[in-house]
Amino acid sequence: MAETKIEWTDATWNPVAGCSLASSGCKHCYAMQMARRLEAMGVEKYKGLTQKRGKNITWNGVVREDPASLLTPYKWKKPRKIFVNSMSDLFHESVSDKFIFSVWEVMQKTPHHNYQILTKRPERMLQFVSQKAMAVLPNVWLGTSIENADVIDRIDYLRKTPASIRFISFEPLISSVGLANLKSIHWAIVGGESGSKARPIKESWIDEIHTQCKKYNTAFFFKQWGSWGKDNQKRSKKANGRVYRGKTWDEMPSVRGITV
């Protein structure tokens, strides 16, 4: 687990390492470059997870469970919002049900933390969480990533998933998702893509999501413009900032009536 600069969480916890591309939003995933750097630094957990294709670094499909990391959340006494598997996907097809159960047990036994699980495979998440043995944990938030209208059906899987908090990360937002149905979705994160190869974001795409958030009483969090600003100019992430409609949007969902 590590402290993080991700604006909507406090720390990251990675009991799984490695992944594979699921959709177009994965094309420039920061975790691929990070895994490559960690391997070069001698971190055994990230050894052999990526490959080079032309000038690009990409996942090679190897996924590694890390049982030792299951002990880490117990060491954190101060309550935190914890992003689970910022470097992978807990519901990747190569992660065993047994290991996911082990992760669930850790989260259940550390109720002072709020865990944020984000997947591009919500169909498996729905299947897993719907099992009779699974309890809906009040400190576990379940979410999915949606980058464009091609994967909008992920919302339907998420909406059916039993959870105390359901959330969507519209990041990187690379095209319009239209007037997405956010019924029973508690939180929406919106952000543009960063990096030298970032694809542009349009303010009208953000407007569509913001409109739906107001309609369905969904908390709205604007994470970043990324490498492209509202004026369609390419600059650094820092230069483009986080201001949308003249303000910074840091809305968070409520857990048992308490905004976290």
Image (cartoon, rainbow, N blue to C red):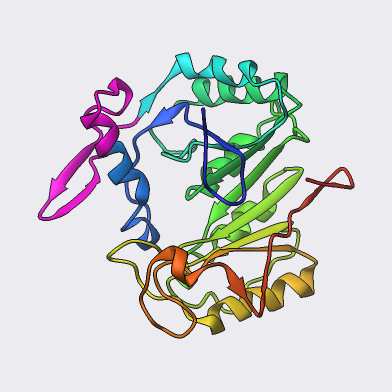
Q: What is the residue that sits farthest to the right in this orientation?
A: 257
Q: Nearer the viewer, residue 16 or 101?
A: 16
User: Which quarter of the picture shows residue 170?
Assistant: bottom right
Q: Quadrant of the rendered structure where residue 237 is?
A: bottom left
Above or below: residue 231 compared with residue 15: below
Q: Residue at x 35, y 71 (%)?
A: 199
The answer to whether residue 46 is magenta is: yes
| Left or right: 114, with 100 as reference point | right
Q: Position of residue 198 (x, y in %)?
A: 33, 67
Residue 21 forms part of the magenta stretch = no
- Taking depth in this image into account, of 37 and 165 the one nearest to the observer is 37
Q: Position of residue 32 (x, y in %)?
A: 30, 44
**Toward the viewer: 192 or 170?**
192
Q: Give me the residue at 52% from left, 68% from top.
A: 241
- What segment carries the magenta color? 36-63
Q: Is residue 248 visible?
A: yes
